[in-house]
């Protein structure tokens, strides 16, 4: 995806969120390898501890979504983004400290390399396919998003 295309998408997404009264943003990052999706498990004492999710995190003040995607993927997994290839969509949710947060998820092409998890945030990772989805603990909205991603890879999987 070209950078000017990403900037245009971001302007539209921020404007829609502002209209909805949402000013806190998070990104989710989908990385595929050999037909498998990377998920990471939150440390036990964290919010949603023990649950698997896409790598990602909060957009900092003055940071673009693309910058956040690149920073968060590297901080959480040690992987470097080559290119953001697709915008997947957005969901709203609440956290312990914020009534409404909007999460924007993106598919990226990442450099090859070993996953190196950030200590204190995640304690495990997995590359999952359709057969793995139901065996890992996930929040319901995360399972729905990840299920749709995996289904996009395997259209024969019953929905």
Image (cartoon, helix red, strand yellow):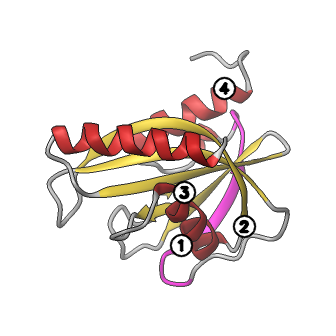
First along the sequence among labels 1 and 4: 1
Mark seen at residue 152: 4
| Mark 2 or 4: the one toward you | 2
Q: Is residue 119 above or below residue 31?
A: below
State the CA–CA distance, disc 2 to disc 4: 23 Å
Answer whether labels 1 and 4 touch (C-beta < 8 Å): no
State the CA–CA distance, disc 3 to disc 1: 22 Å
- As drawn, is 94 to the left or to the right of 124? left
State the CA–CA distance, disc 4 to disc 3: 23 Å
Give the quadrant of the N terminus: top right
Residue range of the region highlighted in magenta in the rendering: 119-131
Q: Is residue 140 visible?
A: no
Q: Is residue 6 magenta?
A: no
Question: Can you identify the residue that label 2 sits on?
Answer: 80
Secondary structure at numbered mark 1: strand
Q: Is residue 113 above or below residue 145?
A: below
Answer whether labels 1 and 2 touch (C-beta < 8 Å): no
State the CA–CA distance, disc 1 to disc 2: 18 Å
Q: In which quadrant of the rendered view does residue 107 lie? A: top right
Mark seen at residue 122: 1
Mark seen at residue 66: 3
| Location of residue 140 in the rendering, given as x and y in whole percent from the top left corner | 38, 40
Secondary structure at numbered mark 4: helix
């Amino acid at each position: 995806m070209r950078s000017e295309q990403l900037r245009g998408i971001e302007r539209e997404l921020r404007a829609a969120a502002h209209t909805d009264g949402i000013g806190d943003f998070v990104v989710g990052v989908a990385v595929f390898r050999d037909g498998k999706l990377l998920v990471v498990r939150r440390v036990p004492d964290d919010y949603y501890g023990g649950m698997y999710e896409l790598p990602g995190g909060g957009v900092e003040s003055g940071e673009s979504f693309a910058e956040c995607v690149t920073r968060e993927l590297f901080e959480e997994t040690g992987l470097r983004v080559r290119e953001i290839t697709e915008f997947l969509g957005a969901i709203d949710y609440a956290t312990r400290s914020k009534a409404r947060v909007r999460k924007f998820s993106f598919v990226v092409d990442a450099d090859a390399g070993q996953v190196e998890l950030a200590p204190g945030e995640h304690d495990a990772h997995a590359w999952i396919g359709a057969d793995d989805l139901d065996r890992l603990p996930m929040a319901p909205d995360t399972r729905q998003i990840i299920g749709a991603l995996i289904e996009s890879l395997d259209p024969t999987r019953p929905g």
